[in-house]
Image: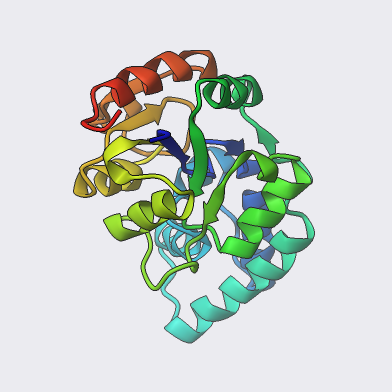
Amino acid sequence: MRPTVVFDLDGTLVDTAPDLLRALDFALEREGLNPPEDHDARNFIGGGARAMIERALAHTQVKFTTEKVDGLFRQFLVHYEEHIADHSRPFPGLETALSRLADEGVVLAVCTNKIERYAVKLLRELNLADRFAYIAGGDTFEFKKPDPRHLIRAIEGAGGNPDCAVLVGDSETDVITAKAAEIPVIAVSFGYTEIPPAALGADRLIHKYEELTEAAMDLLARRPLA
């Protein structure tokens, strides 16, 4: 059985903050609101665009009705789709790490709360989509992270088995999801999280992608079916 390594997208595979934050600025400014500073807003990313908008509103102590948040969300998506890869780039060393894992016989997949069509579009524009056997977005199923079924179904969609898989992510949501699915998790230290990466409780913490293959293969070797 071929092992599977599943990746979160925003803050894990790709530094998407520049384009996400510009879309957030656009949506907030359309409502006459002052956007938060980038160094604050960067950690709002994670859990999907709507969650990011809600965190930004909470940060600015603005209370909107559900309908107003829906409107912000629509404005965000309009801008983001048009500018999805203007400044977003893979993290350094990613593509070499993906090649090394593939050379080890590992199947690669994505499990993100980003809307599926945006995840696919972003990865295609960055010439990364073909690297992955399966891309599961936040609307691919009727559930999403931190529901463990999102991760399990992503693994199965890639033709893998949850008993021989590892998740790579950057947030508390990723760690909670993996632990609920009883799947080992590697955290990257360069993503988007208000919690210090070392305090996330991941099985491994890496600081650069050059460290990924060794960490992933070690965890996979400890799995029952690996």
Image coords of residue 73 (percent x, y): 57, 72
Residue 4 image offset from top left, x and y in percent? 42, 37
In the picture, measured across the screen, residue 180 lies left or right of residue 77, that is left
> Residue 164: which quarter of the image?
top left
**159 relative position to 161: left or right:** right
Q: In this view, does 187 lie above or below 62?
A: above
User: In the picture provided, is 46 more to the left or to the right than 99?
Assistant: left
Figure check: 77 above or below 93: below
Q: Which residue is drawn at 57% across and 44% down?
A: 37
Quadrant position of residue 188: top left
- Split into 4 quadrants, where in the image is the C terminus? top left
- Identify the residue at image location x=63%, y=51%: 20
At 61% across and 28% down in the image, what residue appears? 91
The one nearer the camera, 56 or 208, is: 208
Placement of the N terminus among the 4 image quadrants: top left
Q: In this view, does 187 lie above or below 118?
A: above
In the foreground, 158 or 86: 158
- Residue farthest along the bottom direction in this orientation: 67
Residue 220, by quadrant, is top left
Examine the rendering and report whether any part of residue 215 can be seen: yes
Q: Which residue occupies the foreground of this view, 222 or 57? A: 222
Vertical position of residue 115 compared to residue 197: above or below: below
Residue found at x 47% / y 57%: 113
How is the protein colored in the picture? rainbow
Residue lying farthest to the front in this orientation: 1
Q: List x then y, in percent, for residue 194.
A: 36, 39
> How far across and down, in percent of the image, does residue 75 sit?
66, 72
| Camera-side residue of 11 and 214 | 214
Whether residue 169 is visible = no
